[in-house]
Amino acid sequence: MSIKSQEHLVQATFQESETFKAKERYKIEAKNSELKHRHGYDIASSSGLFGMEIQGAMAIFAVNLKRIVKLMGQ
């Protein structure tokens, strides 16, 4: 049994609401799909925890950098 703080309970309640499921969840899933399919976040390319942490950080950095460049172009 885990003890959750009030913030965790509020967030968990929000994630179960129809508002989150209808309006927010697809954005999260789209970003996860981009990380997985376009930036190699689905399979570790090196062994060891440090290598996986670096791969994850680089994939997320690349996605964020793409977003920054796109926003600067507007």
Image: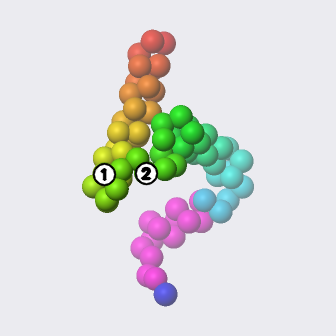
Q: Circle 1 is placed at which residue position?
A: 51
Vertical placement of 4 versus 14: above or below? below
Is 36 left, or right, of 59 in this rendering?
Answer: right
Q: Residue furthest bottom?
A: 1
Query: What SS does tag 2 mark?
Result: loop
- The mark that comes first in sequence, 1 or 2, is 2
Q: Circle 2 is placed at which residue position?
A: 44
Residue in the image at 31% along x and 51% along y: 51
Q: Point out the stretch of residues depicted in magenta.
A: 2-14
What distance separates the C-alpha of mark 1 from that of mark 2? 8 Å
Residue in the image at 71% along x and 47% along y: 22
Residue 20, magenta (yes or no): no
Q: Is residue 27 visible?
A: no
Q: Which mark is residue 68?
A: none
Check if mark 1's residue and mark 2's residue have beta carbons within 8 Å.
Answer: yes
Q: Position of residue 27 (x, y in %)?
A: 60, 41
